[in-house]
Image (tube, rainbow, N blue to C red):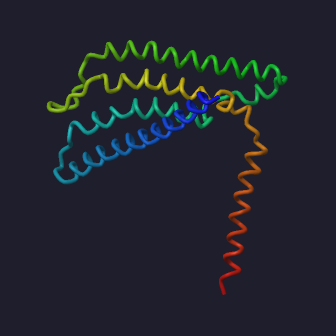
Amino acid sequence: MAILATARRLSDVVNTACTVLCVGCVLGMLAISFVGFLYTLVTGSALSWTYSLARLFLPWIGLISITIALRSGEHVAMTLLVRLLPAPLVKVAAIASLAVMAFFALLMIWYGWGYFLNATQVYMVSDNIQISYHWTAVTVPLTGLIFLLHLVYGFELLEHFSDENALIDEALGDAGTDAAELKSNREVRP
């Protein structure tokens, strides 16, 4: 059990790092686009490299955010169909879902690593800015590894095992606390 707990903590740390990375990529894209916009306002001509450089962040944002969605349980799920099944078949469907996810992650690692190794070209952003295709190609096997790491949470990743009533009660309990705090704040004021 200690190994599973350690793997889950590592998954949480990696998920936080992925979130920070995606936010950083979005901010990087915005900063590059804003520089291009300001340059156009000031000089009247456009920088040719801003759009090309900014779009190099898209594979990182797109693929890494998939792992964040998986860890948050925000992936596409057929919850209604699964809930109509008898309890033993729900577990079979959940195990099949996790197996398909693991298989998909392994395929991303296997084929992504080959894609990464064969990405020998250079992306010409401008005459002076040249970026290796390794920059974007590495996202494929990396996403597969992170995807596989998040699978240590097992059934917790699947929405049809969550208890909506408990989630609603928890949300209402937080809302009730906020309302009680507001009421007490109003009573203190003259």
Q: Is residue 80 left or right of residue 118?
A: right
Q: Is residue 68 left or right of residue 59?
A: right
Image quadrant in which the C terminus is located: bottom right
Quadrant of residue 187 within the rendered picture:
bottom right
Please identify the residue farthest to the bottom as the structure is shown: 190
Asked if residue 156 is positioned above or below residue 90 in the image, the reply reads below
Asked if residue 179 is positioned above or below residue 121 in the image, the reply reads below
Give me the residue at 66% from left, 29% from top: 77
Please identify the residue farthest to the front as the structure is shown: 2
Please identify the residue farthest to the right as the structure is shown: 86
Give me the residue at 70% from left, 57% from top: 174
Q: Is residue 60 left or right of residue 46?
A: right
Quadrant of residue 176 within the rendered picture:
bottom right
Q: Position of residue 121 (x, y in %)?
A: 25, 18
Give me the residue at 64% from left, 31% from top: 157
Q: Position of residue 35 (x, y in %)?
A: 25, 48
Asked if residue 155 is positioned above or below residue 116 in the image, the reply reads below
Give me the residue at 63% from left, 17% from top: 99
Q: Position of residue 57 (x, y in %)?
A: 36, 34
Q: Position of residue 163 (x, y in %)?
A: 76, 39
For the image, the number of numbered tags is: 0
- Residues 158 and 49: in front is 158
- Residues 63 and 178: in front is 178
Image quadrant in which the N terminus is located: top right
Q: Is residue 94 left or right of residue 31?
A: right
